[in-house]
Amino acid sequence: MGLIFAQLLTGLANAATLFLVASGLSLIFGVTRIVNFAHGSFYMLGAFIGYSLMQVLPGMFGFWSSVLLAGLAVGVIGVIVEILVLRPVYKAPELFQLVATFGVILVIQDLALLTWGPDDVLGPRAPGLKGIVRIMGEPVPKYDLALIAITPFVLFILWYLISKTRIGILVRAATQDREMVGALGVNQAWLFTGVFFLGATLAGLGGAIQLPKGGADLLMDFNILAAIFVVVVIGGMGSLPGAYVAAVLISVLNVFGVTYIPQSTLVLMFVVMAVVLLIKPYGLFGREEVAGEHGQVGEPERPIKPAGTRGRIIVGGLLVILAMVPFFGSNFAQVLITDIIIFALFAASLHFILGLGGLVSFGHAAFFGSGAYVAALLVTHANSPMEIAFLLAPLGAGGAAIIIGWLCMRLTGVYFAMLTLAFAQLIWSLVYQWGEFTGGDDGLVDIWPAAWLNGTTPYYYFTLLFGIGGILLLRHVAHTPFGYALRASRDSMRQAEATGINTKRIQWAAFAFAGAVAGLSGALFVFSKGSVFPTELELAKSFDALIVIFLGGVKTLAGGVVGGASLEFAKDFLTRFEYWRLLLGLLIIFVVILAPEGIVGASRRLGERLGFVDDGEGRR
């Protein structure tokens, strides 16, 4: 009994940091509707800045002053990010800011590397709170007890600020109807800045206050990112009490999971999130009318016409150039273009459900990885010919998409996106932990194509055929009655249903089709590399596809392809430099601010102004 109580206290102490960071994210999202993936970076900065301050401010007063000053410093950094990066794109399609915050992550990572170096730093012990106390015979760190006492105090302060002050009333009003707040004369820009300052400050406090328990390192931002989003979604977007309850729930379950079911620790919080969302689609304390607004990707665009003669000539010319690469290019050029085509196909499959269907998925890599692993497992364990394994890979990925899509379709917006992430993490955990079958962390190797494709040039043409063919198939389906029904479901679900369209069934079918195409790209990938590892199923893979779609242009059919090709070329060039993440992050932010419609959208607008492109209304 004493051990169980001590573990419960450990979980409550761990919840302190998680709640501080998640509450800041919840506030920012509730008011600004920004899916702020840079929030983990603020947490990391809080830890590093707190560590530096603790080196020059000794004693108990210096320790707690350092924690407070670190939070305020990160709050100021948050204000700078909000004004310089996010404020210029507030009027861009919702969720487009996701790309900007990812650029911020890359910039902060390299700035932290440049400032504090690559080595992890060990946090100092809290003065006056060193050592342990015994409760029911079990040792409990004094600092854990201090964190348990501090957390409800912070929750009370935040509750009082939001519930009892004029600023809090404005924040709550903006959470429910920010347009009405603007109509009442409130300066929304500075309200957003103030909320961003508070949210970033809380993240910085969370990073600094955990120093005695974990120190600081350059991977802290990504390590906590999934956890804080899970907490915010379980609690309900914008709900501080929900964030507190969810943080306690997740932290306590993780502590007990490590002790009694260690193999569950990789996905336990995602299982909890999936169960909660399947029972309560908008989280424990979430509200449907707020949650339903978050999945939009901008105003409905004008109809996209099938490619005209000029467009077909351009595509045909590009295909001829690609077909001539082996005659004039090197083997490296063929490998690079092969990689670009595979990634462009994967991005185009996600763009099909995001751009045409308005379905934002954070777990699309599950289908890419499923296709790759289906092919690899058939070759490894069933001695299947490459041709059979290649054909069955998209069917396996499509089957997984049918099941996951059926479970996710009752949700919308960020809740839909997070549930797809939960199922993707479950698949990743299965692959990672089932080592005797999937190879685990060592992956599966020696998965090479058939003899007639053995060589760089034959496989290049094979990829060109199926990769470009898959992209053209997606574009063709977009102009079929199914594609128009999917767009109608995105633009106005009620009007679409009034015309007899079963919107959920259409979206479900599109989700499954996109999963199958992603599986096709995974099959191309595994035979091009000869191996596959669990990293192909990770969250970062899905984020890469989301980023290139927004960079290319959500409201264009070519956005995923152009964005994918552009990012891959940029990475190939920038990774030659030591601080390439800083350069890539600045490039992403630059594109987001100057071309919020994406590369394709901006190019189209420029062409309309110069008279080279039809503006959609018969003018040139």
Image (cartoon, rainbow, N blue to C red):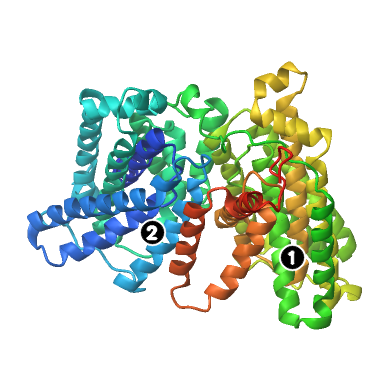
Q: Residue furthest right?
A: 452
> Which amino acid type corresponds to the residue marked 1 in the rendered image?
Val
Q: Residue at x 77, y 81 (%)?
A: 329
Q: Viewed as shown, does residue 163 lie left or right of 562?
A: left
Q: Residue at x 48, y 78 (%)?
A: 577
The answer, for residue 393, to whether it is visible in the render is no
Q: Where on the picture, by quarter, is residue 385?
A: bottom right
Q: Residue at x 65, y 60 (%)?
A: 564
The residue closer to the viewer here, 39 or 93, is 93
Q: Say the numbered circle drawn on residue 526.
A: 1
Q: Viewed as shown, does residue 70 lie left or right of 262?
A: left
Residue density around tag 1, few if under 14, some if 14–19, many if 20 or more, within 10 Å: many
* Image height of 271 relative to 161, above or below: below
What residue does disc 2 label? 220
Q: Secondary structure at mark 2?
A: helix
Give coordinates of residue 166: x percent, y percent.
Answer: 22, 25
* Image height of 573 relative to 506, above or below: below
Residue density around tag 2, few if under 14, some if 14–19, many if 20 or more, within 10 Å: some
Q: Where on the picture, by quarter, is residue 27?
A: top left
* Image height of 361 relative to 457, above or below: above
Give coordinates of residue 405: x percent, y percent.
Answer: 69, 36
Q: Say the numbered circle drawn on residue 108.
A: none
